[in-house]
Amino acid sequence: MRVIKIGTRSSQLALWQANTVASQLNHLGHKTEIVKIDSLGDVVLNKPLYELGITGVFTKNLDIALLEEKIDIAVHSFKDVPTKLPEGIVQAAILKRGNFNDVLVLKSDEHFFANETAIIATGSLRRKAQWLYRYPNHSITGLRGNVITRLKKLDENDWDGAIFALAGLSRLDLLPENHIKLDWMVPAPAQGAVMVAALGKNEELLAICKELNHEETETCVTIERKFLQVLEGGCTAPIGALAVIKEEEIKFRGVLFSPDGKNKIEFSKTVAVNNATDLGEFAANYILDRGGKKLMREEINIEKEILVYSTKNLSTDQSNSLSSTIGVSMSDFITVRSNRLKPVVVKNPIKNVIFTSQNSVEALLENFIPSELDFTNIYCVGRRTKRLIEKKIGKVTHVENSAEQLANYLESDFKDSEITFFCGNKRRDDLPTILTKKGITVNEVECYQTSLTPRKLEEKYNGIIFYSPSGIESFLVENKASDTVAFCIGETTGAEAKKHFRNVIISEQSTVESVIKSVNEYFQDK
């Protein structure tokens, strides 16, 4: 009987993975042998590297051994595998995924969270960025080596904690009691999964490995790695992704941070399993189109005399439209998540509907395909909302620049007795109240949730750009309203800003472009 040679590094975690694969192959009746490959000295090369199709910084000794047929299969922690495999090597199997979460191992206890500062150790740029985004006053120190070495370093140094992959600690039975599962931290693409690689030409071996493959895990990590592949473009950046299957649906969350953890762009969506083929690519392009390219560049901006802060992430085109004399930093101070709506919401045709934001339109489209939305009359606020509706749903009957103006229009011109209002959980306008007083029944459908994501600004800025009253509320959680100019996207946001800021500039129109124009005009002669 043929003996399958399993290539692996010699670290304890790598050996655990290789032995797990060996055990599963043995259970299927195959004989195996573990072959440790840690350096090029463990492999006698028959050809130069370029003839093997191996170039660049991602060269792995296991790949070389595999291509030289010194081993039959190679076992990897999938999160460490480049998205492009060397020519001739293919993904042969993915084992059932372990726990994908990160974990904070505490030096003593969690009381340090009550202190103003703390020191956390990690060698991962992704973990560093996410920790600093959540705890901007903490310090991050580097941490390298295998799992045992890193645990020893935590014990020897005056740190408050260190971040590890939960799967690695659990597999080696090294998870200390004093730990905190970081279920808020988005893991690395394919974290917790073990991948088996083989030569594409070895059809017999591929058929054997296929029996080890866990299809649900394969579906999820394929989406995550496609997300990573489209984003990375040769750059190193803090990228997290997680796809989970539940009840024939895939819930995906992808995120890109700036290396310093000050900025974040996030995407999340739930779709049917059979409709998730391009989900990873779609999510990555969504992030790139909304400023991801700028975060990926990791460039240091030239010092500018005028600095403004945007309380939402701007697209590259939007940030580039600021005057060359103005430097901009940005972060989302509010997070929008779509609610899951029951099919009965749009089961029957609806004669009259209202949208006062793009968020409500996008949330509805995450729940239903356009052909399911049968609306006779559509009323909305804002030109961008109108364009989105007419592109995705249908013709808009009437549009106004503000919710108050739309309410006044409907109060005088609306002839029916009922209307459906698609809105969020923090609706601040009086539109339903005005219509109800007129005797019109308003059916409110809460289709998205807005939550505050405040953060403290360490630098002093000449202006802060606000896009909603909720953004102002979030800003004031960690910051004071000083003499800084508040630039506001419209009258509703401006009215809220005037309660707190001395100098408020309100854009002529309720668009991002208009508020950026007001920033340029204000600082033109400064």
Image (cartoon, rainbow, N blue to C red):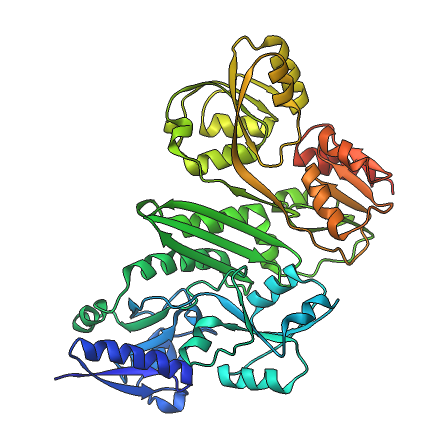
- The residue sitting at 36% across, 86% down in the picture is 37
Residue sticking out furthest to the bottom = 41
x, y percent for residue 283? 47, 49
Q: Is residue 131 left or right of residue 219?
A: right
x, y percent for residue 218? 32, 61
What is the tally of numbered marks visible in this picture? 0
Tell me the quarter of the picture where residue 344 sits: top left
Residue sticking out furthest to the left = 1
Q: Is residue 132 left or right of residue 199?
A: right
**Residue 509 higher or lower than 104, as above or below:** above
Tell me the quarter of the picture where residue 132 sits: bottom right
x, y percent for residue 522? 82, 38
Front-most of residues 199 and 154: 154
- Where does the C terminus fall, quadrant-wise? top right
Tell me, yes or no, if residue 310 can be seen here: no
- Where does the N terminus fall, quadrant-wise? bottom left
**Residue 362 higher or lower than 228, as above or below:** above
Q: Is residue 520 left or right of residue 178?
A: right
- The residue sitting at 32% across, 80% down in the picture is 18
Front-most of residues 308 and 163: 163
Tell me, yes or no, if residue 189 can be seen here: yes
Q: Is residue 297 left or right of residue 98?
A: right
Front-most of residues 302 and 284: 284
- The residue sitting at 50% across, 27% down in the picture is 389
- The residue sitting at 59% across, 79% down in the picture is 143
x, y percent for residue 177? 52, 77
